[in-house]
Image (cartoon, rainbow, N blue to C red):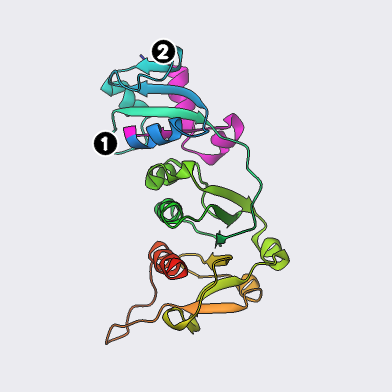
Amino acid sequence: MVSKNQIKLITSLQQKKYRTINKLFFAEGVKVIQELLDSNFELEHLYSTQNDFEDVLPSKKSLILEADLKKISALATANSCLAVFKIPLEKKIKESGLIVALDSIRDPGNLGTILRLCDWFGVKEIVCSKETVDLYNPKVVQATMGSIARVNMSYIDLNSFIAATNLPVFGTFMDGVNIYKTTLPQEGIVVMGNEANGISMELEKLIKNKLSIPRFGEIQKTESLNVATATAIILSEFRR
């Protein structure tokens, strides 16, 4: 059984305001929850329709009905489990290796996919403008498929950070140098821009290395690539 207060609290966590106030977020599905349990995230409480997650203390989990899970789930079709976790304190940014910088990424699915890509390509740090969608948005958490546990993400004044860094800074632009014909370093910051507007003009002025992903289609009508797709191509080239 889930109490009315628990339902009210968990459903409120779909909004950033209440995640910030309560310092809590939730995840759904066995895979994502298990990844978070195996990491440094601290479990507040687990709700499941099955007797699973045997390593979780009985005091930290509740066996509930499917009908109750539907009341607290953010998914159209509820999974078998939902877990509430504490939002950890932001860690210090390590300015080394390859860093991905996100300028006002608004789509939760894109952010979650970019996190998975960074995890895949061994990128440990993502720095974001404060306008970027919240990491603990349920749709972002879901889209990361557990990679949220392995990549450090920080919300900062991106312009100040880029202006002050000693690392080479790269950005993607339509008029940039062909990425397939460029020698890329092992260290640097890769800036990815907003879905509709690309990289902001203020930030563009700070980017010395402009890259482009050339179009090969005969008609050349495609305006741009999805930002997560572009991130995959760019990280693949940096790691080649």
The answer, for residue 2, to whether it is visible in the render is: no
Q: Residue at x 67, y 57 (%)?
A: 157
- Residues 131 and 149: in front is 149
The answer, for residue 149, to whether it is visible in the render is: yes
Q: Is residue 215 above or below residue 149?
A: below
Percent across and percent down for residue 182 are 48, 81
Percent across and percent down for residue 47 are 37, 22
* Residue range highlighted in magenta: 3-30
Circle 1 residues within 10 Å: few <14, some 14–19, many ≥20: few
Residue type highlighted by circle 1: Thr
Residue at the spot of label 1: 77
Of tags 2 and 1, the one toward the viewer is 2
Residue at the spot of label 2: 58
Percent across and percent down for residue 144 are 41, 47
Q: Point out the tag, 2 or 1, that comes first from the N-terminus.
A: 2
Quadrant where the N terminus lies? Answer: top left
Q: Residue at x 60, y 32 (%)?
A: 21
Q: Measure how far apart labels 2 and 1 are at the Cα level.
A: 26 Å
Dot 1 falls on a residue whose secondary structure is loop
Majority secondary structure of the magenta segment? Answer: helix
158 displayed left or right of 4: right
Residue type highlighted by circle 2: Pro
Q: Residue at x 47, y 44 (%)?
A: 148
Q: Is residue 179 above or below residue 239?
A: below
- Examine the image and state in which quarter residue 86 appears: top right
- Residues 219 and 71: in front is 219
164 displayed left or right of 225: right
* 5 part of magenta stretch: yes
Q: Residue furthest bottom?
A: 218
